Amino acid sequence: MQKNILEYLEATAGRLPDKIAFQTDTEALSFRQVHQQARSIGSRLLKDGYCNQPIPILMGKRPQTIAAFFGVIYAGCAYVPLDVEMPRHRLEQILSQLPEGPILCDAAAKDLAAALNRPALFYEEAAFGPVDAAALAALRERQIDLDPIYIVFTSGSTGVPKGVMGCHRAVMDYIENLCTVLQFNEHTVFGNQTPLYFDACLKEIIPTIKYGATTVLIPKSKFLFPVKLIEFLNDYRVNTLCWVVSALTMISSLGALDTVVPQYVRTIAFASEVFPIRQLNRWRKALPHTRFLNLYGPTETTGICCYYELDRAFSEDETLPIGRPFPNTQILLLDEENRVPEPGQQGEICIRGTRLTLGYYRDEQRTEAAFVQNPLHNLYPDKIYRTGDLGRYNARGELEFISRKDHQIKHMGHRIELGEVEAAACSHQDVTSACCLYTSGKLFLYYTGPAAATELSSFLRSRLPRYMLPGILRQLDTLPRTPNGKPDRKTLLERSSQHG
């Protein structure tokens, strides 16, 4: 029985040593190289006395960054993925929460690491040093599957990033079930879109080392030119995309699929927000033989916990389900009295199972507020994670995401789901994306696409009751987004206050 994700890497490096594991258009590492360099990094960290502590990694989007992740895990530490493109203030906020110690960085990040007042351990030095096999083996003997392997910092409601800790057991449970459902194998070629400092990349990185697949790290610059992006996917024979919705809609809304299609792609799994049905249908029409899966899951549950494989056509006024939980995961819907709501009624989506992360790093109060005892019984300790998302089961028994609890507002005496306003706007043929906000007693709608504001306003009057109509519509060239692809509501709220 496996208890450590490094066993995936070790088995594959022995079976397919020379196969490319991770690559960009300029760099590549084989499984042998990832394995060797990771063991060297782990040995160096152990030699320097670092074990059982967070190690920040400050590098760009390159194969060596992933080898650094595994190197930190070899030392029994938890990697903290940072990125050279992160704002300096955010880097300082994250580092202030970590104990004193080195930043593992490459030569390109040397000056930035120095400016952050941390000692630097250079990848170019650590990855090619000696391997202390005895020290690594002795450490492995002491490890258990609840040991943490990463801390991913996400945006916190207080403005200070919060660190979510993942462990071997949760990651392996996640990956074993994800790979079965999405049918990954040795021939899978992932086209990675998400930054490496998010947990979303786990669904590509870990299956790659488990099966001996390949992950192509797509440079951020490629997403500026949709046609060239698709040509890049074809050049590398990418057959699997696990992308945020905004990356997919960017391609379809600009008409790139009318020029060229990703001819090798046979699986598209998307997450992060609701996929506008109009844009989704453009993808399905362009790739009629491709599997499409809607994924759902917060960082606190080690990534994805629900999935729905599209098995029928959807009209633009329908809701796309998030489906069912992965095996070994249970979804509970709880109403405001912590009871199971009646069929068809909404409740907060709560998650239980091995998938739960260890909680928030050095934040017991926040951990206890989010990871709570299952209120349906008090017979034994049974933790669930309260997502803050609202959902309900449709007539087919499929789970549907409605909105965030904090996106449910009361306006003119009526309860309004902001997501419902956004969905109505996105059903207009000339609207690509939309985000609805409520502030200062007003409903604001920001949207992208060629639709004129007056035209869209008239369209919404035919779709929504009067109390749900946004009073202010703002057309944008692009919708500001957080680094994980979700609409940046904080930035839009600031714009709303300026607009009065």
Image (spheres, grey):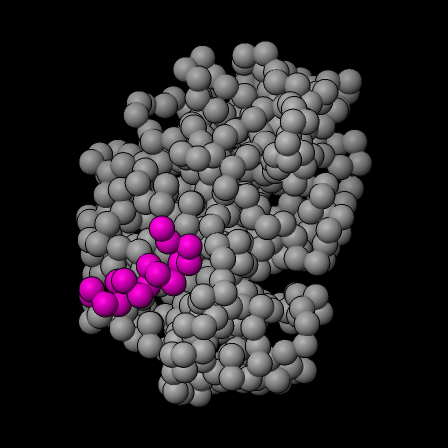
Depth check, front residue: 224 or 120: 120
Can residue 71 be seen at all in this image of the molecule? no
Depth check, front residue: 403 or 118: 118
x%, y% of residue 456? 54, 29
Using residue 421 as the reference point, say whether residue 99 is left or right of it: right
Q: Quadrant of residue 374?
A: top right
Using residue 104 as the reference point, say whether residue 6 is left or right of it: left
| Quadrant of the snapshot with the C terminus | top right
How many marks can you see? Answer: 0
Magenta-span inclusion, residue 22: no
Q: Residue at x 44, y 88 (%)?
A: 125
Magenta-span inclusion, residue 5: yes
Magenta highlight range: 1-16
Q: Quadrant of residue 66?
A: bottom left
x%, y% of residue 212? 25, 59
Q: Is residue 294 above or below residue 56?
A: above
Instruction: Assign the magenta stretch its main secondary structure.
Output: helix
Q: Residue at x 23, y 67 (%)?
A: 14
Can residue 397 be seen at all in this image of the molecule? yes
Depth check, front residue: 40 or 310: 40
x%, y% of residue 231? 24, 57
Q: Is residue 66 above or below residue 468?
A: below
Q: Residue at x 51, y 37 (%)?
A: 353
